[in-house]
Image: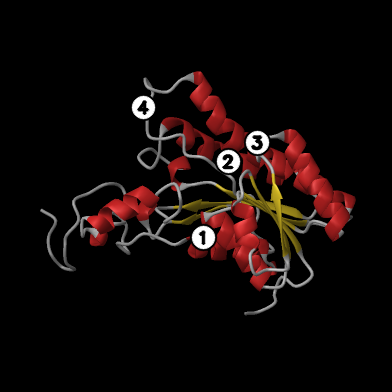
Amino acid sequence: MSQRFAGRTVVVTGAGSGIGRATARLFADAGANVLAMDIGEGAEVTAEGYTSIIPVRGDAGSENDLAAVFSSAAKDLGKVDIVCANAGISGGMAGLFEQSADDWAKVLQVNLIGAFLAIKYGSKAMLDSGHGGAIICTASVAGLRAGAGGPAYSASKAGIINLAQTAAQQLTGTGIRVNAVCPGLIETGMTQSLFDTARNRGREDKIGQLNPLQRGGQPLEIAQAIAFLASDDASYVNGHALIVDAGLSSSLPFAKARKLGESSF
């Protein structure tokens, strides 16, 4: 693999599974030193076989933990070049009347406030080092419109999209770019039961049937989009939400023809 991130230092939150694990390993494979943070032991699993991945346990929604992680990255690895604010929880699919304020607070604390803290301390580490950098936040198509997640989760992801835009403006003149990536249906811990149920019933062909590619996505496909946004190839991309959903959000709902050329009516 190309060593296009050789000499770069990357911090990934929520690196213990799914998109975070794929992202941490992709950067390591491309030559970066990676600090992989997760609240559980998953970060240690992510680091197995990689001398360039340093696992750290911490809560992405805790200001003390985030401050300590970025302080450690700057001290032990010399600098911070790239931040992937990926940590997130789903909060389930309960409706408005089934969720409490406490339910919302838990989701927002990790998903939205966690992203804010990663931007706050990540950008400070970059500025202290006297250089720019790239920050990528994991949002979701659920943050674009209804139908892809529960109320709290969807609101948190919409907040992340706006946060990336606002932070990009706040960091004007620093050389720090802030973007978001909006995954569609990806096979991760959050969606594993859906994928497993479909396979067990022999209905795997129905996974992702609402998008034009008619399949679910894999974590590496999102990691590759994150790597693009972090790379010099995206040097003029800032304050942007990159949708990676196989075309799911490109259309309004309609009755689709089963085969090319067939009428939907």
Task: Report which residue position mark 3 lands on.
Answer: 61
The answer to whether residue 161 shows anywhere in this view is yes
Q: In this view, does 212 lie to the left or right of 70?
A: left
Give the amino acid type for the residue marked by disc 2 in the picture: Ile
Kindly report the distance in space between the C-alpha atoms of the residues bearing marks 2 and 1: 16 Å
Task: Answer few, some or many: residues within 10 Å of disc 3's Cα (few below 14, many 20 plus, some between 14 and 19).
Answer: many
- Tell me which numbered mark, 1 or 3, is placed earlier along the sequence: 3
Q: Nearer the viewer, residue 41 or 253?
A: 41
Marks 2 and 3 sit apart, C-alpha to C-alpha, by: 14 Å
- Residue at label 4? 95
Structural distance between the alpha carbons of marks 2 and 4: 21 Å
Say few, some or many: other residues with alpha carbon within 10 Å of mark 4 (under 14 / 14 to 19 / 20 or more): few
Where disc 3 sits, the SS reads loop
Residue under label 2, please give it. Answer: 160
Amino acid under disc 4:
Gly
- Image coordinates for residue 179, horizontal then vertical, percent: 62, 52
Q: What element carries label 2?
A: helix
Q: Which of marks 2 and 3 is in front?
A: 3
| Relative height, residue 146 to residue 197 (above, below) | above
Q: In which quarter of the image is residue 165?
A: top right
Sequence order check, earlier mark of 4 and 3: 3
The numbered mark, 2 or 3, whose residue comes first in the sequence reads 3
224 vs 9, left or right, is left
Which residue is located at x 75 percent, y 73 percent? 6
Which of the two discs, 1 and 4, labels the residue nearer the N terminus?
Answer: 4
93 is higher (above) or lower (below) than 88: above
Q: Name the residue under label 1.
A: 222
Residue 225 falls left or right of residue 55: left
Closer to the N terminus: mark 2 or mark 1?
Answer: 2
Task: Estimate the x, y position of residue 245 in percent, counting from the top left.
Answer: 42, 56
Circle 4/circle 3 CB separation < 8 Å: no
Q: Which residue is drawn at 36% across and 27% down?
A: 95
